[in-house]
Image: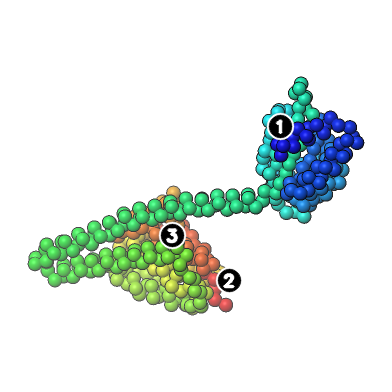
């Protein structure tokens, strides 16, 4: 537009008849471009606006001539004060003003506009008028926003990856340290150990290995879902039966800590979800309840109908969770790893995985707790029709 500035500035000094001819020239000139332009005088009255304003705003030139305030009326409310201030400053100074803002077209569509205003002044710095060009910048802005979101997602993914590897390093070391310690003791003291003591150590080793296996399973499941390789395969199944299966699998851990589990099976509750995913969720929740329960305590599991959903509740009388940790339970960037009441190791990854799986199956998961008195975890899943 720079090559036209002197030409356009001279228009302000022409007679009305001469201006009309020059406006006709501008109309032809700028209708060959994707910009719509306008010219205002010292009183900020509209002298000229190109007719291709309609292709961008939906309003034709006559509507702008009749209501000059229309320029400001179509600006998005969130941008209006900022743009008005910038333009007023441009009218008072000699610097060009290039800015971006949103407009609402006549049809109600939102568009991004790139606006460049060139104010004109005489030798005494008196404002003579201004010329402005406008172009639809929506496509570029859309790409810019998408790129920004992509960069933000990448930053989050990198932070998650760093946290994930931090969890791996800590918990693999902890898990294997305990296992190595048990096997080393068994190796060194084998000849002096009584059969009951040997059996006790073997049970501890078995329990430790099962914990490591569950940990590796969670890692594999989490990595699959993060890489979008996991396909959700929902089907109708009995949540009641699945809970009973998970309890049976954890019988050794319950017996070891002398923990009773209360699950009153009165009704069959069927859900529509990916059974393998929900299996992982219930395994993690039951395992955590055992891990943080004291020896000789109890765990309760309840199933109930809640409109179109089935609600699962598991509660324990264990260590509980501090208030400041409760809101961070399901976040990978603040995953909380704590030892259980029998020094069981864990990552907190199981809860993060559980949240992912429940939400991908159309449900919600939450936790409540009173530190020192126990915790309650609840999730919902769509009921089978």
| Sooner in the amino-acid sequence: mark 2 or mark 1 | 1
Distance (Cα) linking label 2 and label 1: 60 Å
Q: CB atoms at circles 2 and 3 under 8 Å apart?
A: no
Looking at the image, which residue is at 71% across and 39% down? Answer: 1
Distance CA(mark 1)–CA(mark 3): 53 Å
Q: Is residue 83 left or right of residue 332?
A: right
Q: Residues within 10 Å of mark 2 (few under 14, many from 20)?
A: few
| Residue 198 point in image, percent of width and height | 16, 68
Label 2 residue SS: loop
Q: How many marks?
A: 3
Q: Does residue 327 appear anywhere in the picture? A: no
Q: Is residue 30 left or right of residue 199?
A: right
Instruction: Specify whether residue 209 is in view.
Output: yes
Residue at 65% over, 52% down: 139
Residue located 27% across and 66% down the image? 209
| Structure colour scheme | rainbow
Q: Position of residue 351 (x, y in %)?
A: 42, 61
Q: What mark, if any, has residue 90 been given in the picture?
A: 1
Q: Where is mark 2, residue-wise? A: 308
Q: Which residue is mark 3?
A: 352
């Amino acid at each position: 537009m720079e090559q036209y500035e002197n030409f356009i500035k001279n228009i302000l000094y022409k007679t009305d008849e001469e201006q009309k001819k020059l406006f006709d020239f501008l109309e032809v000139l700028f209708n060959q471009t994707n910009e719509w332009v306008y010219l205002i005088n010292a009183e900020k009255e509209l002298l000229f606006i190109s007719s291709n304003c309609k292709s961008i705003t939906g309003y034709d030139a006559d509507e702008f001539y009749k209501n000059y305030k229309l320029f400001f009326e179509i600006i998005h409310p969130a941008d209006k004060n900022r743009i008005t201030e910038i333009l007023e400053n441009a009218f008072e100074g000699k610097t060009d003003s290039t800015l971006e803002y949103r407009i609402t077209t006549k049809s109600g569509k939102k568009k991004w506009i790139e606006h460049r205003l060139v104010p004109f002044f005489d030798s005494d710095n008196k404002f003579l008028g201004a010329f402005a060009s406008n172009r639809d910048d929506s496509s570029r802005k859309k790409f810019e926003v998408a790129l920004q979101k992509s960069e933000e997602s990448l930053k989050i993914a990198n932070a998650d990856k760093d946290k994930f590897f931090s969890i791996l390093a800590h918990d693999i070391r902890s898990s294997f340290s305990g296992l190595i310690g048990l096997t080393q003791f068994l190796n060194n003291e084998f000849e002096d150990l009584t059969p009951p003591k040997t059996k006790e150590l073997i049970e501890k080793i078995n329990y430790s290995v099962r914990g490591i296996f569950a940990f590796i399973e969670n890692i594999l499941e989490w990595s699959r879902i993060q890489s979008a390789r996991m396909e959700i395969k929902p089907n109708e199944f009995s949540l009641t039966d699945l809970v009973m299966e998970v309890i049976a699998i954890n019988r050794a851990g319950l017996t070891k800590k002398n923990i009773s589990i209360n699950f009153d099976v009165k009704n069959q509750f069927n859900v529509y979800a990916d059974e393998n995913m929900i299996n992982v969720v219930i395994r993690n929740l039951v395992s955590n309840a055992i891990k943080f329960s004291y020896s000789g305590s109890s765990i309760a599991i309840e199933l109930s109908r809640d409109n179109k959903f089935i609600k699962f509740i598991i509660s324990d009388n264990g260590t509980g969770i501090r208030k400041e940790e409760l809101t961070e339970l399901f976040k990978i960037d603040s995953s909380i790893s704590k030892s259980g009441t029998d020094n069981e190791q864990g990552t907190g990854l199981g809860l993060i995985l559980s949240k992912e799986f429940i939400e991908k199956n159309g449900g919600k998961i939450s936790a409540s707790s009173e530190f020192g008195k126990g915790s309650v975890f609840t999730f919902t899943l769509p009921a089978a029709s």
